[in-house]
Image: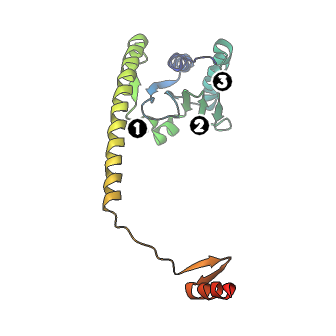
Amino acid sequence: MVNIDFFKLALKAAKIADDKKSIDTVLLDVRDLTAIANYFVVTTAESTPQINAISGDIERIFKAEDAIIPVRREGISSSTWRVIDYGGLVVHVMSPQVRETYNLESLWREAKIINLNDKEKSKDVVEKKHVKSKTSAAKKSKKVIKKTAKKTIKKVKTKPVKKVVKKGKKAGSKKVSVKKSKKKILKNKK
């Protein structure tokens, strides 16, 4: 299996969008926030033909140069929003109205915004952040597990135990009382 550098793909997608005169292209690092993808590229196109051109070029160039095809596409028949999902990279090409309405940057406000003007510096920052976040995430998950275990143990210790007394046995679908079952046993012995 080929190891795909989704950061390089994200930068390439942003460059393709900018070459097609897109507006306000943003690269979001969402690795620490979701398992959906590593990066989101969000860009604005002012018309349906521009949306088609940007998304079409991204797909064509990725297929030709990187031999990568999308996992899925959404909005092919939409004139306002196109989504191209490459697994670790999700590209959103939106009209200005749709981008303002859904405001993905606000939805993913905890994501690291990567400066597209200084790509090498951004890559170093993202890689360092990712290494730090792995260790801090591991520490946080250990703390959560310990707290959950302590709460569970307290609940088990303090929970009152109720004894359940059965008054009879089930014989098929009928419930037989203890007296009747004793009488049957005594009859069978005679």
Q: Which numbered disc, 2 or 3, marks the residue that appears first in the sequence?
A: 3
Residue drawn at (40%, 38%), measured in percent from left and top?
106
Query: Which of label 2 and label 3 is nearer to you?
Result: 3
Residue 56 is labelled as 3
Judged from the image, the secondary structure of the residue bearing numbered disc 3 is helix
Mark 2–mark 3 Cα distance, whole angstroms, equals 15 Å
- Image coordinates for residue 3, horizontal then vertical, percent: 58, 17
Q: Which residue is mark 1?
A: 106
Name the residue type under label 3: Gly
Residue 79's image quarter? top right
- Image coordinates for residue 121, horizontal then vertical, percent: 38, 12
Q: Which residue is mark 2?
A: 80
Judged from the image, the secondary structure of the residue bearing numbered disc 1 is helix
**Would residue 187 be found to the left or right of residue 158 on screen?**
right
- Image coordinates for residue 83, horizontal then vertical, percent: 59, 33
Residue 63's image quarter? top right
Are the residues at dot 3 and dot 1 in contact (C-beta closer than 8 Å)?
A: no
Of residues 69 and 76, the one drawn nearer to the viewer in this rendering: 69
Crowd band around label 3 with a 10 angstrom C-alpha radius: few (<14), some (14–19), many (20+)? few
Are the residues at dot 2 and dot 3 in contact (C-beta closer than 8 Å)?
A: no
Mark 1–mark 2 Cα distance, whole angstroms, equals 19 Å
Of residues 129 and 154, the one drawn nearer to the viewer in this rendering: 154
The quarter in which the N terminus is drawn is top right
Judged from the image, the secondary structure of the residue bearing numbered disc 2 is loop
Q: Which numbered disc, 1 or 2, marks the residue that appears first in the sequence?
A: 2
